């Protein structure tokens, strides 16, 4: 089955630690995205990538980093510089390089203790 | 600041009724509009997209777009308890970014 796999689904982190969230897709989509969702708020774009070895900052990139070494993979690292990292993180992909219809993974819920 | 505005709800409708969800957007250059459904604790799922003025129907769902008024709506006919979810409106604001509203929570009661 084609889709997007995110792992882990739940993650607990101590303050000061970096964590990496995995996102893998087998849809053969060019574009991939990372969003953050906080209660009562819309999705906010962290980073996006339209092609391998290239990525762009979204609206809230500070404290995050990404890589796109393979078409299938777009991992997100939440660094210790992110002041309020507790959130629901969503990875998505789209068939076209221009923003269109997004397919989302199941999400990763990060809690900082 | 480009924005998409939605009433947070909850919008409560009886089973079998029509649910009407509304959305306004501020960026006049937006060309594409999307409705996503998100069940509690789950990820969003695309249910409708609309690109031109007028109505677009898909099963029990109808999306309506009025670019002059910068207004998008989603109608759900014959609402079912399984339609209870948060509905996110999004516009394509250029620069390869979707702008999402905060969502409207819909509750369909038997």
Image (tube, coloured by chain):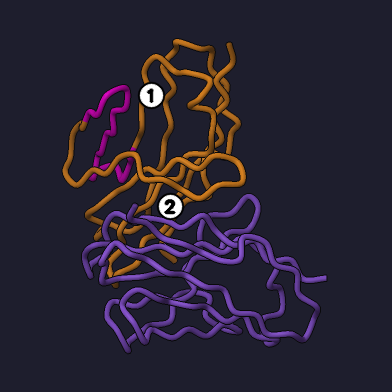
Chain colours: A purple, B orange
Disc marking residue B52: none
Task: Give SS at disc 2.
Answer: strand
The one nearer the camera, B46 or A40, is B46
Image quarter in which the N terminus of chain B is found: bottom left
Q: Position of residue A30 (x, y in %)?
A: 26, 71
Residue at image location 47% in from the left, 51% down from the top = B101
Which residue corresponds to mark 1? B76
**Label number found at residue B4:** 2
Choose the circle earlier in sequence order: 2 or 1. 2
Q: Quadrant of residue A102?
A: bottom left
Residue B45 % position (x, y): 41, 45
Whether the magenta-drawn stretch holds residue A8 is answered as: no
Determine the image quadrant of residue B98.
bottom left
The answer to whether B102 appears left or right of B71 in the picture is: right
Q: CA distance from mark 2 to mark 1?
A: 20 Å
Q: What residue is shown at x 24% (from left), y 29% (from top)?
A: B58
Depicted A60 relative to depicted A2: above or below: below
Looking at the rendered image, the disc whose residue lies closer to the viewer, 2 or 1, is 1
- B80 with respect to B46 (left or right): right
Dot 2: within a 10 Å radius of its alpha carbon, few (fewer than 14), some, or many (20 or more) residues? many
Instruction: State whether residue B53 is above or below residue A55.
Output: above
Magenta range:
B57-72
Q: Is residue B66 magenta?
A: yes
* Chain letter of the residue beneath label 1 in the structure image: B
């Amino acid at each position: 089955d084609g889709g997007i796999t995110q792992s882990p689904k739940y993650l607990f982190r101590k303050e000061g630690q970096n964590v990496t969230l995995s996102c893998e897709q087998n849809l053969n989509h060019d574009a991939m995205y990372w969003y953050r969702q906080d209660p009562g708020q819309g999705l906010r774009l962290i980073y996006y990538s339209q092609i391998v070895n290239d990525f762009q900052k979204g609206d809230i990139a500070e404290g995050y980093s990404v890589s796109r070494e393979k078409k299938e993979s777009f991992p997100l690292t939440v660094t210790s510089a992110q002041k309020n990292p507790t959130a629901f993180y969503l990875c998505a992909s789209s068939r076209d390089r221009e923003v269109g219809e997004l397919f989302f993974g199941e999400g990763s819920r990060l809690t900082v203790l | 600041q480009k924005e998409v505005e939605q009433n947070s709800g909850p919008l409560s409708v009886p089973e079998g009724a029509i649910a009407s969800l509304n959305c306004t957007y501020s960026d006049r250059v937006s060309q594409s509009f999307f409705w996503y459904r998100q069940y509690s604790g789950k990820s969003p799922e695309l249910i409708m997209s609309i690109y031109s003025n007028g109505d677009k129907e898909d099963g029990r769902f109808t999306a309506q777009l009025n670019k002059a008024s910068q207004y998008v709506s989603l109608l759900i006919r014959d609402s079912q308890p399984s339609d209870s979810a948060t509905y996110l409106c999004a516009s394509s604001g250029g620069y390869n970014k979707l702008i999402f509203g905060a969502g409207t929570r819909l509750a369909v009661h038997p």
